[in-house]
Amino acid sequence: MLLLSLTGQAQQLTGKPGTFTVGNKEFLLNGKPFVIRAAELHYPRIPREYWEHRIKLSKAMGMNTICIYLFWNLHEQQPGQYDFKGQNDVAEFVKLAQKNGMYCIVRPGPYVCAEWDMGGLPWWLLKKQDAQVRTLQDPYFMDRTKLFLKEAAKQLAPLQIQNGGNILMVQVENEYATFGDEQAYMEATRDAVREAGFDKAQLFRCDWPSNFNKYKLDGVATTLNFGAGTNVDEAFKKFQELNPTAPLMCSEYWSGWFDHWGRPHETRSVSSFIGSLKDMMDRRISFSLYMAHGGTTFGQWGGANAPPYSAMATSYDYNAPVGEQGNTTEKFFAVRDLLKNYLQEGETLGEIPAAKSIIEIPAFNLTESAALFANLPAAKKTERIQPMENFDQGWGRILYRTTLPASASGRKLLITEVHDWANVFLNGKSIGKLDRRRGDNTVTLPAFKGNAQLDILIEATGRVNYGKAIIDRKGITEKVEFTDGKQTTELKNWLVYNFPVDYEFQKKAKFTKGDANGPAWYRGSFDLKETGDSFLDVSKWGKGMVWVNGKNLGRFWKIGPQQTLFVPGVWLKKGRNEVIVLDVDKPEGTTIAGLKEPILDQLRADESLLHRAKGQELSLTGEKPVATGSFPAGSAWQEVKFDKAVQGRYLCFEALSSQKSDDPYTSIAELELVDEKGNPVSRLKWKAIYADSEEVTASNNAADKVYDQQESTFWHTQYSGDKPKHPHHLVLDLGENVTVKGLRYLPRSDKNTGGMVKEYRIYLKSSPFKL
């Protein structure tokens, strides 16, 4: 009976060649209609020993397919040195899916986003000073892309379904329309994927409902990405008009969202998530659940978004159905209960595998320390300051040292482009900390006699993985100057010290008993009689990274919301276990304990999350709007054309009313300015400087969401506690004077229409608004 029940589902998972093609409004598996129910899993975010457990959980949830990214920078950490072994053995991961009766979708990039360092592109591309990515304008990028794709295909092309494997589809690039519209680049990438060896599987590409039509790609199926609570009919409306015979697929159905350091923990309700999923199932729309299980971004691999710059937390829990530790959640059972009603002929739900054991580790003290300044590696010399990539360093920390001339009065130190967090020392004493998230660039220098030693310790907190800011070199990327207000002088003649992330480097530190002053490594140990998963409580520590038995658990930062680090039980051992912590800030205490539950929502923000100072009020008295009007109801992009081109640096958007008459809120997913040629103005320098109201307690709906280039996130005025009424105001500093002819507005994309703007006024001027 078991064999009979699996026949319809797994008839081509026995090693016999099969087919998967695009039919009329449906996908065809071996000539028969097939609805893809995929679970996105990322093999580097799951310890290899747990791969099969997470695959079994996906099958038990009702999935028939596993969807994976390939991470170029993981597999080629130095040019020409490819690693597909051990934790990187992606072919073994795909084979495990096949062993468990699951098909596979492969997304090899070259770019993948994934909240992963540089979106999966290798850091060493940035050693080329004029590097460009995701374009034909840089032949070096394209040449290296082709080489990687060939290596990836060596691993996975034999597993295409036409060869008897389980790979149904292979993706070309990733969400390219959010980056550009260079059709020739996408055509060249498509051809490179085929020539590499993915010449049999069905190719596809993914974009958003609002931008999928920015380019064409013949011979490649088109899929759309959107999140929990989306109006499914509205999301596919334009696509169906232009592609009436194409199958429908949501290739990333976002189950939750990712966390940023210093911002509230992200969640998406079970009801909104399940509602849109049921809508897709009722319409026989294929989907891939992003994420089914997020896992953990171990080591240095966490990325960042920009604008504004915002680094990702280590946990990639994603509020997904399967939690960070592989635990089943309310969402898991909601999905399982839904999908049992949509199984195809011959299918059965997989059994839920046994949970992984989880243990507490009693608090232990890290009794040894090694001061960073007492354990400097060999220095490198440079006249002008340079980013860490120029010193052949990919990740970690970098220290810049030079001499400051004596000063009888205080001066200011100006650091142009801190990437990403700096601790500044004068004669060994910390005098200031700079954070790229806040746009910090200035430290006040005290008066001092004689020359002084200046040290600037930089921690890289993740390369931008999204948008035009992806060329994101680390360290100090431009210059350091000092000024007395009258004269500004660039500092030169630097000694540079590199602190990479590998364990072999950390264990060389010379540890002694006791605590250290300033940045330091700390070492301790704990004993176990039995192993199991645990969550190390690092809430007493400042900022840095943790290694357990040589394994890099990832970054921590006291600002939260994450206050624990997941330590897989398979990385622990009976008996003595070693822990090394590198803290570049200052710990409150040097103890750690292992908890049975993670702490993912304990925010200790080091700045106000509001873009409004206490008592601050915007005055528009005497100001003349450049446009006044009313938006029609609907969730698509809407454009306001100005009567004439207008120049300015400061933009004020005033929402006078909402589409629903009794609605006091304002919500905006995205704002764009359009130049005289109809092209969008770069948003990389934009900064929110005032919002009369924001929801930053119950949800992460801050004002800067209007230019974060993420259509599923949005600014929303406060709804927990106070509910301020119209008018609502948002003021942006564009970073420079720009000439614009119009504004584009994107409403929120979910089923909830709260706050959708109706009447508005738009102001643009070169001088700041009165606040």
Image (tube, grey):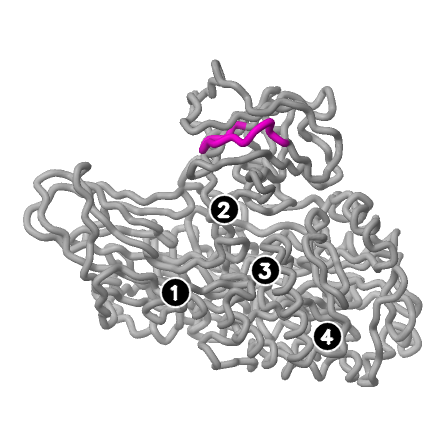
Q: Which residue is mark 1?
A: 129
Q: Residue furthest top?
A: 621
**Disc 4 or disc 1, which is closer to the eye?**
1
Q: Residue furthest left?
A: 450
Q: Which residue is mark 2?
A: 307
Which of these two is toward me, 15 or 7? 15
**Disc 4 or disc 2, which is closer to the eye?**
2
Of mark 4 and mark 1, the one earlier in the sequence is 4
Stretch in magenta: 641-652
Q: In the image, residue 243 lies at what x, y percent? A: 83, 55
Magenta run includes residue 649: yes
Q: CA distance from mark 4 to mark 2?
A: 37 Å
Q: CA distance from mark 4 to mark 1?
A: 41 Å
Image disc number at residue 114: 3
Image disc number at residue 450: none
Quarter-of-image position of residue 16: bottom right
Quarter-of-image position of residue 196: bottom right
User: Which residue is at 18% across, 48% downward?
Assistant: 489
